[in-house]
Image: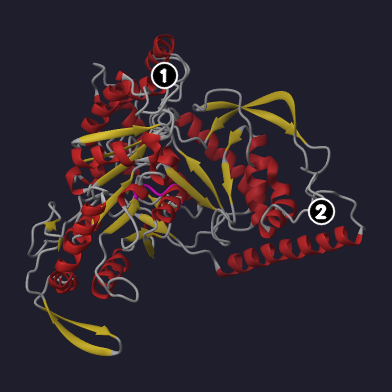
């Protein structure tokens, strides 16, 4: 099975390749079916009949080439490293769920009623009109425009909030007022100093002073602000090569390649690895960049239940047994795509079990560590480090520099052959402008700090501070009776509120009390999973977190959003003893 193909594109080469594939098809078809099981016999229900299938120990081979990572035979179950943590996904109370559905239904009904009044001329508002396009069909999607003018418009003040400072532990939120019920928002020139609970600044490197800022400033003077070309067209700087070597060392892979945009790292590189006839098995909660990359690839896509290994194994078995639709030919390759930390759920991927399954079924694994790299593990090297696994067991490691490194862009790490393939085939490498040198230098300096290559223990302090802050805030919120999603060790803390009116009021009331939070509702989440998403940073002190907890408690007295009915032992494994053992740093990280 080939992860990617470098077959020459000449006609003779293509004819030879197709002929070879047909010659091998009959031989490989049964082997690809049988590798779904590691037992001697299994009973499989197919087309309404029960058939016995025997595993003859066939290798996973396509065109005479096998997956080099996995040996044939029984694959032992990997036991994950013991972690004193728990993932919680408590269901919404029945009454709250019903009220949430009713709330959204009421908003939609009112929206349609307003549209009728506008068509009749009773409502003189022009929010439903596309100015300058008279006589044209509507340019925008009907539901999207309906949602924007009738629902989103009234909550615009809670999103897209402009800030006028670095997104550190504190930030300045600019004040906005609206003279026409949020149709227009005008900046007053004033700002509020708030505790930042919304930015992805996990290790506190989003700074305008200190070693990282000074190094980036020197790079700006030396290289300038822009590159003016792609990596293949005189946009390949020596600092890019230095960064790629450091990234590969940091994540434990042979080689790495960096890109100027994190979203594009997924969206434009997944299509270089897959094509029609391939299968992607994707977690149902995967990020939009992964979804877009899957769609652009032309491969078939199927989803498994979020972080559910039984569902993943079932999808793998069905894919191998049934093959492609209609023809039932074996898939050219199967790629499992997951995230390290899920940015809306706060959950951590069950990577040990995923690696076991990918070895068992001879598939490939694509791991998106956008939120986990730098934020998890004793060395800050992500979910692989968190579970103490071998990075080489992950075929494709992806991550971004926008969260833990206080910069921008992304990377893909893996074998040297994989990276060479991407350098010549990736649209992000061939057509996108290279990463600016000051950004690359910010990443290098912060990564060296995490690795301890700067000669200090600042990186270790930041990692320890983030771990303690995460557990402290989660433990206190659980004690207060809130429903939280995700893992005890995840710095992404979704606080469930469900009812749309309460979500919006929570964001506004927190801002009044100088706490900046992110509130999220439908369609970014499911209808009954509206929430406030809190992001923890190593830059936060205990005093900041205590103040934030006091404000959340005060706002809860207005809204009454403590919905949890389970005992705290069933919601978290954290105890006061855990917080004492993982004590915070006495001297706050610079």
Q: Which residue lies furthest to the bottom in this view?
A: 49
Q: What stretch is highlighted in magenta?
A: 339-344
Q: Which class describes the residues within 10 Å of circle 2: few (<14), some (14-19), or many (20+)?
A: few
Of 576 and 139, nearer the camera is 139
Query: Which residue in the protein does label 1 denote?
Result: 438
Which quadrant: the C terminus? top left
The image quarter containing residue 510 is top right
Estimate the x, y position of residue 111 in percent, counting from the top left. Answer: 76, 60
Q: Does the image show residue 10?
A: yes
Q: Is residue 224 above or below residue 505?
A: above
Q: Earlier in the sequence, mark 1 or mark 2?
A: 2
Q: Residue furthest front?
A: 12
Query: Which residue in the protein does label 2 denote?
Result: 135
Q: Which residue lies furthest to the right in this view?
A: 122
Left or right: where 124 falls relative to 324: right
Of 345 and 539, nearer the camera is 345
Q: State how far apart marks 1 and 2 are (Cα).
A: 49 Å
Residue sitting at x 38%, y 35%: 430
Q: What element carries label 1?
A: helix
Q: What element carries label 2?
A: loop
Colour scheme: secondary structure
Estimate the x, y position of residue 156 in percent, counting from the top left. Answer: 69, 43
Estimate the x, y position of residue 78 in percent, counting from the top left. Answer: 16, 57
Q: State whether the magenta stretch is mostly helix, strand or loop.
A: loop
Estimate the x, y position of residue 549 in percent, counting from the top left. Answer: 53, 40
Q: Which class describes the residues within 10 Å of circle 1: few (<14), some (14-19), or many (20+)?
A: many
Residue sitting at x 43%, y 56%: 295
Which quadrant: the N terminus? bottom left
């Amino acid at each position: 099975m080939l992860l990617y193909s470098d077959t020459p594109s000449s006609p003779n080469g293509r004819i030879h390749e197709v002929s070879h594939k047909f010659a091998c098809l009959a031989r490989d078809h049964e082997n690809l079916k049988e590798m779904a099981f590691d037992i001697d016999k299994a009973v499989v229900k197919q087309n309404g009949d029960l058939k016995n299938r025997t595993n003859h120990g066939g290798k996973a081979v396509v065109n005479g080439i096998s997956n080099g990572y996995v040996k044939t035979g029984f694959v032992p179950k990997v036991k994950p490293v013991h972690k004193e943590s728990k993932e919680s996904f408590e269901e919404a109370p029945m009454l709250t769920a019903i009220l949430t559905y009713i709330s959204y239904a009421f908003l939609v009904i009112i929206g349609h009623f307003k549209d009728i009044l506008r068509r009749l001329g009773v409502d003189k508002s022009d929010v439903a009109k596309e100015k300058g396009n008279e006589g044209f069909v509507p340019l925008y999607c009907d539901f999207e425009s309906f949602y924007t003018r009738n629902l989103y418009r009234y909550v615009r003040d809670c999103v897209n909030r402009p800030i006028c400072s670095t997104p550190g532990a504190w930030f300045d939120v600019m004040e906005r007022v609206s003279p026409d019920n949020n149709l227009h928002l005008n900046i007053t020139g004033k700002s509020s100093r708030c505790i930042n609970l919304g930015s992805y600044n996990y290790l506190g490197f989003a700074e305008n002073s200190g070693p990282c800022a000074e190094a980036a400033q020197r790079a700006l003077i030396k290289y300038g602000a822009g590159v003016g070309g792609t990596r293949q067209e005189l946009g390949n700087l020596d600092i890019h090569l230095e960064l790629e070597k450091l990234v590969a060392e940091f994540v434990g892979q042979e080689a790495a390649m960096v890109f100027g945009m994190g979203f594009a790292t997924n969206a434009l590189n997944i299509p270089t690895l897959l094509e029609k006839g391939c299968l992607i098995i994707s977690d149902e909660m995967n990020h939009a960049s992964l979804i877009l990359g899957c769609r652009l690839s032309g491969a078939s896509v199927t989803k498994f239940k979020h972080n559910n290994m039984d569902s993943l194994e079932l999808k793998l078995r069905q894919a191998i047994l049934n093959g492609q639709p209609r023809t039932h030919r074996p898939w050219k390759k199967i790629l499992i795509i997951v995230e390290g930390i899920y940015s809306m759920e706060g959950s951590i991927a069950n990577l040990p079990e995923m690696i076991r399954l990918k070895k068992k079924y001879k598939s490939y694994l694509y791991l998106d560590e956008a939120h986990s790299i730098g934020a998890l593990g004793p060395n800050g090297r992500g979910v692989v480090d968190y579970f103490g696994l071998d990075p080489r067991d992950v075929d494709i490691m992806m991550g971004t520099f926008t969260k833990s490194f206080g910069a921008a862009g992304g990377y893909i790490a893996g074998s040297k052959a994989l990276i060479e393939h991407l350098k010549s085939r990736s649209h992000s490498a061939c057509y996108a402008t290279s990463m600016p040198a000051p950004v690359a230098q910010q990443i290098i300096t912060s990564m060296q700090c995490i690795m301890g290559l700067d000669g200090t223990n600042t990186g270790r302090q930041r990692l320890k501070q983030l771990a303690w802050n995460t557990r402290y805030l989660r433990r206190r919120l659980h004690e207060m009776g809130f429903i939280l999603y995700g893992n005890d060790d995840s710095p992404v803390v979704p606080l469930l509120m469900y009812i749309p009116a309460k979500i919006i009021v929570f964001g506004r009331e927190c801002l009044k009390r100088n706490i900046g939070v992110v509130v999220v509702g439908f369609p970014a989440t499911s209808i009954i999973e509206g929430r406030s998403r809190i992001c923890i940073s190593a830059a936060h002190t205990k005093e900041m977190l205590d103040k934030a907890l006091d404000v959340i408690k005060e706002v809860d007295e207005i809204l009454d959003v403590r919905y949890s009915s389970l005992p705290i032992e069933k919601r978290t494994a954290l105890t006061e003893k855990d917080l004492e053992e993982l004590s915070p740093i006495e001297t706050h990280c610079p």
